[in-house]
Amino acid sequence: MEDLILTMIVRLILPFIQIYGYYIIIHGHLSPGGGFPGGAIIGASMILFALAFNLKEGSNKISHDTSTLLESGGAFGFAALGFLGVFMGSNYLSNRAAGFPLGIPGNLISSGMIFLISIFIGVKVASTFITLFFNLVEGKTHD
Amino acid sequence: MTALAAHVPALVVVNLLMCSYIMPVLARWKKHLCIPVALGSVSFSFILSIFLTFQVSRQGAFSYALGGWAAPWGIEFVVDHFSVFMLLTLTGVGLLILVYATEDLIHELKQDVVGWYYTLYLLLMGSMVGLALTNDLFNLFVFVEICAIASCAIISIKENRECIEASLKYLILSAVGSGGMLLGIAMIYMVTGNLNFTYVTEALPQAFELYPRNIMVAMSMFTAGIGVKAALFPLHVWLPDAHSSAPSPSSAILSGLVIKIYAAVFIKIFLRMFPWDVYETVPLMTIVLIMSSVGIVVGSMFAIVQEDIKKMLAYSSVAQIGYVFLGIGLLSQNGTLGGILHIFNHALMKSMLFMSAGAIIYSTGVRRISDLKGIGTKMPLVMSVFSIGAFSMVGIPMTNGFISKWYLAIGALDVDKPLYVAVILLSSLLNGVYYLPIVVNAFFGEGKESVTVHHKLPWKMTLPLIILASAIIITGIFPKLMLGLADKAVMFLLN
Amino acid sequence: MIEILSNLLHNFYYLIAIILFVIGFHTMLSHSNLIKKIMGMNIMDTAIFLFFVSIGYVEGGRAPIIELGQDHVYVNPIPSALILTGIVVAVSVTAFALSLIVKIYQHYGTVDAEEIMRIRSREV
């Protein structure tokens, strides 16, 4: 079922939704939001795409393999980032002591590790949303 | 190496979680690496737990601040005698169950979800280890949720109807339980302004005078929430279905470890966080005592009438978790010692019994108890292991079940509650009623139609059984080994 | 009596959270439709989140985003931060429960708990 109005509108607003999602992710340390809400918005945008066009096309954009990789990579990256602190002689998941530059509060590149962690969480959440949706729709057997 | 030694408390959790995150990738592209990585990760955590045990016995309890943020602000892991006791139980038994699972799962699950099983298994282990270590209320909640989701998923991964239904029931009830716990945490945070156990403990006596209602609501919420998750008697309805329909390794870990870790959380919250003089005004522990002793008797009675062997074992778990809570509720040194010791002992016994039941199902396909007649001659090893477990459940001397029941009875006498000694004796009798006929029939009974053994048991399945059975005997004859550790844990909790 | 009423009025946000909690709990227990049970679970979770967040509210406070050089009263950010985690957890539990319900629907052709019980009892 492809509806002209629906596809046109989705085509128009999809870039804005995605940019808004990215904005929320990378401004996670400055304003409300962060990895989870931003990731959810990006995931929702992909779901919207798949619903408005057809599911085949939607799932072609991000295959199961890619989303598995992204999911594992996001979570693993978060955990691995914590070890930088251990190697720098401080505690697990430490920020400044691990040698991350803190920058000036209020700037985009600041707050050291939190910035990176938001990105990892965003990747993880977005891919999880997409996987969840497609698994529910297709009824596949992946958890 | 010395630099890393300080970070072991974080490493023991993160190692499991990280390996669980990469498992889906391995399952997709490098299937042969799944089992080695899972085994390596759990055994690494086991080694680290032994290391932590030595460290604690040398220098006493110590804490680890995640992210370098000191206690009231950051999340804190505390390694004390109680948490290393739990760590050893979790990682040791967990490793043996995993070894068993590598072989058993090939027959029980579809080929393409076996990789996912290890993800969930490691996630479950990681969250349980985290629960044993954490010293922060909210962190505790997060680990509880991870643990709940992972343990539901580990049931529903076997996609037949019973499993999915049991899993959904478990999920809904445990969501109510988590909700209750979160409300309890909110109440505690409201009146103390802290989430760290140590600081909450300091603030509680004063808060109890000012806002007794809040604290009482928090206590009831925690009791109900943890009670649902630990299957304390009237809240146990999800357990028999969930534990009996799951794949055998899942049943072993759920019955052996998961319900025990909630009992440990209960100990952490009610014996360490709340000051003990609260129980003089609030009759919480009396309620726990009543619930647990009714659970002990009724759980055993339900177990007698079961026909499915795994369902019988599941009902027996309801009864046995009652012992742990009985020990906690007695609020005496020996009683708590018995309760804590029973966490370890029952983890050994029940995981072994479930695994031997799984082994019987694996090789013969028989689940009904009445069909087990004469199986002792066909599978002598598994049935003798099962008999050791059964004797330990009944509490026959020379097995470790006797030791914990002994201390529970002494604890009950210490606080002048001989009624609970009678409960323990009665339930031992009931345990005998449903365990011993299986053993007797298996060795001496004559089945009408002989049971055929289809598969020979691989060594990966027999080895964990033998190790656990010998551990039961060894800790039964030389109870000093675990008793020393449990004794220190109780001493630590009493202070 | 007056005292209790004024206490309730003063802490009306706690009262509302508890009312929501009871609504959710009741929905969860009394409805046999599994989807509605999950909805009830979510309402219950939301009630707890509202309760937790309202603990951290400071009279006249604003969102805790620090602007340099300005002195404001901020609300306590810790409950909000914790509840973000709680929401994430609730979302994952919901997703998992829904996927289980999809499976149950495939097996039984219904999402009604009583209907499922009837089907099972007929088979036994």
Image: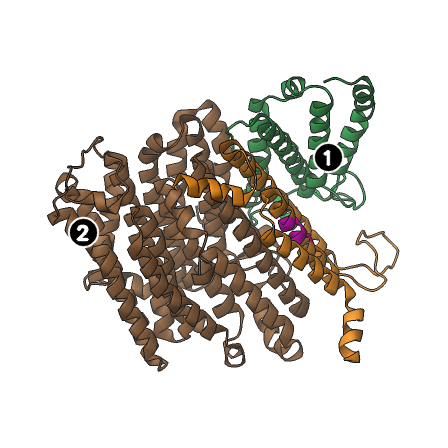
Chain colours: A green, B brown, C orange
Residue B17's x, y, as percent?
50, 42
Residue B93's x, y, as percent?
34, 49
Q: State yes or no: residue C45 in magenta.
A: yes
Q: Is residue A122 visible?
A: yes
Residue at the front extreme? C122
Q: Which residues are magenta?
A: C40-46
- Residue located 76% across and 62% down the image: C13
Task: Classify the position of the C terminus of chain C by image quarter.
Answer: top left
Q: For the residue carrying disc 2, how many other residues have a C-alpha within 10 Å: few (<14), some (14-19), or many (20+)?
A: many
State left or right for residue A117 relative to residue B325: right
Q: Is residue B123 visible?
A: no
Depth check, mark 2 against mark 1: the one in front is 2
Residue wearing tag 2: B439
Q: State yes or no: residue A63 in magenta.
A: no
- Residue located 47% across and 59% down the image: B235
| Figure check: B221 above or below B34 | below
State left or right for residue B276 relative to residue B332: right
Task: Classify the position of the N terminus of chain C by image quarter.
Answer: bottom right
Q: Main structural element of the magenta stretch: helix, strand or loop?
A: helix
| Figure check: B282 above or below C44 | below
Indicate the quadrant where residue B452 lies: top left
Kind of residue at disc 2: Val
Q: Which chain letter goes with mark 2? A: B
| Figure check: A77 above or below C11 | above
Q: For the residue carrying disc 1, how many other residues have a C-alpha within 10 Å: few (<14), some (14-19), or many (20+)?
A: many
What is the number of the mark on residue A41? 1
Q: Which chain letter goes with mark 1? A: A
Disc 2, SS: helix
